[in-house]
Amino acid sequence: MPGSASLMTPFKRILLQQAGRNPCQKTVSKYWTSQTTTLNFDDFCTILKKEKPATKTELLEAFGKIDTDNTGYILHDELYKILTTRGEKMTRDEVSAIIKQADFNCSGKLDYNKFCDLYMTTSEQCCKTAREKLEVDSRLRQQQLGNQAELSSEGITLPVSKPSPRISRKTDHKLAPTKGDSRTPSRPSSAQSCKASISTTISMGASSNRNTKLIEPDTMKEWQCAQSKGCFYLEEDGEIISHKYKLHLPQRSTVCITIKPLNVRQVEGKSYRWLSVDTALYILKENETQENLQLVSFTEQQNKEMFGWKGELGSGVYWLLPFTTGCRLKKVKPQIAGEAKLVYRGEDGELALTKEFRAALLDIFETIDLDGNGLLSLEEYNFFELRTSGEKCDEEAWAVCKENFDMKKNELTRQGFMDLNLMEANDREGDPSDLWVTLLSLGYNKALEMTEACPFVIDIYAEKCKPRIKAIYLEAGSSQLNRAICKSVVNKGEAKVMDGCENIIIYTYKASRRITSVIENKTENKVIIHVNNEQSKNCLSNRGLTVFAVEVAPKSTMVSQHVMPLNEQEEWLYNCVHSLLH
């Protein structure tokens, strides 16, 4: 219903606070989007898993950015100014409530060491209370399986995730475990025995970058075209977020829709990880409401690194949801000796951007310039801002930007973008900390290599009308996307009923570069499925493990795993056994 997100925000905040979290509006909005209709207990536990409670060290580092003299105190006047004008702004009454606490305030100053101690004690007490309530139900003490919640006897503090970008500006980025490591146990307990199972074996040949009859765009010279760029970004917990789009077709037409990794820069002899990342688009038809989306198809035809779909679409609005399996875009351990230099002082003493940093900024500009016109509109710039700072630039701030940086037609030029980053360096007197926050949030490592992001480009060709595409969101895969993936596998995959349990069905879809399996649970009870890939050869699972387990809710369908070849130039064997645990 209209306004449901805003009505639910206080309630969701209270829930998260009771679990020891302290969510900002951006954090709440990330999980309660315009497409969210319900939030069950498993959803809530998943949020707790992703949202890491702040540590005392992180809090002290954040206060240390303000207390530049390292006195251990912050003047109340300065605290008022910061908390009411920056980030998610507080009211003066809210700030007054903080400074009236005698435990950590005296003589017009806040003792932030004492404040941090009290904060941590309160957070731990919230967690303890939550655990005591959960432990009443012994079923919630089982080990975490698959995509469900992890609740251990050690407590409700779950694996580290990417903090909100606003907090990131005050803390160091730390690598979290891979998606598989954080979400699934490597070996389900041997005490749990299997009572039904099904085996699937598929032998796949080496990749030949085959052409599966996808019409080349150059054969459609008379067709009208629309294009947009976008990007997959890897979060700290292994979750992948991306732009999501609306496609408008004014009349019925045959269309060709393609997606492929965007090659923003070529350096001879250098390979780029993101060019090997698999990409796909799911096409959904919008009906009366945004919640009521109907799967049309997805891009399964391949021409080298491009995947596409060709067919007829009626007039109306469609959603294009980009997807990557996560097999190739995942966390890697950094093997970097040093840190690239971002700025230096010239002979005149003025700060300047290094050649390497300028090259990275140009690549970033190409990626965030979604329409490819060589300029950044306010809308395009705000996708960049939301990703890197968690905030948006309003019209007034954009007007100020126009007065100070090079613009054309009210859009920021490449040079203006460079100068904007140079200004940020000057604001911090050459300290590159904030610049690194921006780079890390965009998928770059300390060697200025883009290792945790994959830019892509979408092209739409229509025979009889002018298509229009527009980026609407930058967020994690929605329930709509998950349902679309499951439905496509159920529709196109091979179905096998589990021996000994006719109400558990495993669907396996085989494409040229990936295999996806989906589990359907038709029973009235949740089930735990053990998944074993030990006999597979030259395979890479998005789970990051060869043996794991997933928990499937009653009367539901969920993805078991996506698998791709480890080496595409060699044959690969998919041999997977799904077993029902007691």
Image (tube, rainbow, N blue to C red):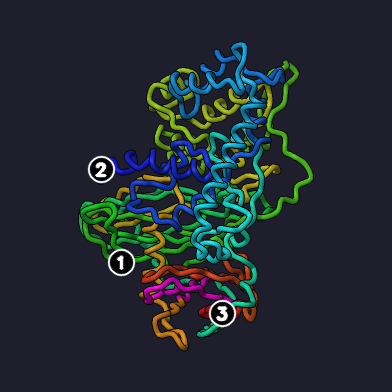
Q: Nearer the viewer, residue 446 or 262?
A: 446
Q: Disc 3 to disc 2, how far (Cα)?
A: 45 Å
Instruction: Give how far across and how far down residue 268 sits, in percent.
Output: 67, 52
Give the residue type that dot 3 points to: Cys
For numbered disc 2, what is the local secondary structure? loop
Q: Residues within 10 Å of mark 3 (few under 14, many from 20)?
A: many
Front position among marks 1 and 2: 2
Q: Is residue 455 visible?
A: no
Sequence order check, earlier mark of 1 and 2: 2
For numbered disc 1, what is the local secondary structure? strand
Sequence order check, earlier mark of 1 and 3: 1
Q: Nearer the viewer, residue 101 or 16?
A: 101
Q: Disc 1 to disc 3, how far (Cα)?
A: 34 Å
Instruction: Give how far across and how far down residue 346 sits, in percent.
Output: 73, 21
Q: Nearer the viewer, residue 178 or 343?
A: 178
Q: Residues within 10 Å of mark 2 (few under 14, many from 20)?
A: few
Residue bearing mark 1: 311
Sequence order check, earlier mark of 3 and 2: 2
Q: What kind of secondary structure does the magenta stretch mostly adopt?
A: strand
Instruction: Give how far across and how far down residue 147 sits, in percent.
Output: 51, 62
Front position among marks 1 and 3: 3
Q: Give the quadrant of residue 408.
A: top left
Residue bearing mark 3: 576
Give the residue type that dot 2 points to: Pro
Q: Give the quadrant of residue 168.
A: top right
- Find out whether residue 514 is within the magenta segment: yes
Residue bearing mark 2: 2
Give the residue type that dot 1 points to: Gly
The magenta segment is 509-532
For numbered disc 3, what is the local secondary structure? strand
Q: Which mark is residue 135?
A: none
Q: Residue furthest top?
A: 107
